[in-house]
Image (cartoon, rainbow, N blue to C red):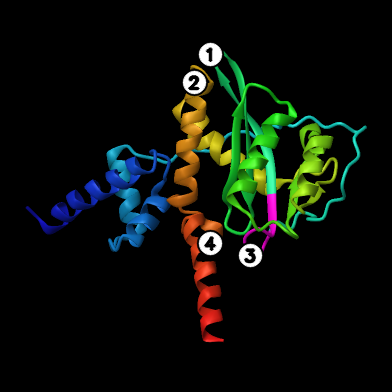
Amino acid sequence: MPGRIKLDMRLELDIQRVWKDNFRVYGARKVWRQLLREGIGVARCTVERLMKKLGMQGVRGGKRCRTTIADDLLACPADKVNRQFAAIRPNQLWVADITFVATWTGFVYVAFIIDVFARYIVGWRVSRSLHTDLVLDALEQALWARRETAGLIHHSDHGCQYLSIRYTERLAEANIEASVGSVGDSYDNALAETINGLYKTEVVRHRGPWCNIDEVEFATLEWVDWFNNRRLLEPIGNIPPAEFEMAYYRQIKESAEAA
């Protein structure tokens, strides 16, 4: 058997493993990146060729749908982010947003809170209701996971859930400064909407249809764990969010020891 055929057969097994281990959502570029991380030297064009041969492809994004409901009568904090979704450390800037999932028993809603530094999902919640408890529960999870919140900015859109008295008071209790995007600006909460878009593409449309809220909640739990700990994100150097944060804290520790 020619050497190239043998090599292709071995690569096909690795490609199928990586693709399946990552919920069958990776395209050739992400599969190639993961193979390189594992020390498997292969050209991207080879991965593309073999994935095409195997009938494998990544998922594609769809249209975005806005879920939060604006209320112009509620007091609104200023926009302290101004579309600059960047942070130099964890717990400097969080962004929050809501999306929805259609099930056979009705709509369910999913709230996410993302730490901008590494795109790490620090809080999330699934509920049948769009009331304030949905976003409050996600916030409480984030506060439990991240204790150092002094000086942190929390950014959202004009959704009434985020402008409610209960939510704004909880942010103040945690020494978190509220920020709300400008009205009529399609990029006012772009990073959070991007994460929502990945969730809709990689979970909702990819794995549906959905029977009930329990299915959605388990799939969301599974996806958040994968997203934080194993999914490769291009904006942070094609590594998982948890790895990016660990590198930051390791650098801080090494700098302190060297001082």
Q: Secondary structure at mark 3?
A: loop
Alpha carbon distance from label 4 to label 3: 8 Å
> What is the three-letter code of the residue carrying label 4?
Glu
Looking at the picture, tell me which residue is in the foreground, 226 or 21: 226
Looking at the picture, tell me which residue is in the foreground, 119 or 184: 119
Tell me if mark 3 has few (under 14), some (14-19) or many (20+) residues whose alpha carbon lies within 10 angstroms of its own. Answer: some
Q: Is residue 22 magenta?
A: no
> What is the three-letter code of the residue carrying label 1?
Trp
Q: Which residue is mark 1?
A: 104
Q: Which residue is mark 4?
A: 245
Alpha carbon distance from label 3 to label 2: 37 Å
Tell me if mark 2 has few (under 14), some (14-19) or many (20+) residues whose alpha carbon lies within 10 angstroms of its own. Answer: some
Q: Earlier in the sequence, mark 4 or mark 1?
A: 1
Residue 89, numbered label: 3
Tell me if 30 is positioned left or right of 142 in this view: left
Tell me if 174 is positioned left or right of 258 in this view: right
In this view, the mark in front (4 or 1): 4
Q: Is any part of residue 188 visible from this angle? A: no
Q: Which residue is mark 2?
A: 210
Q: Is any part of residue 159 visible from this angle? A: yes
Q: Secondary structure at mark 1?
A: loop
Tell me if 47 is positioned left or right of 82 in this view: left
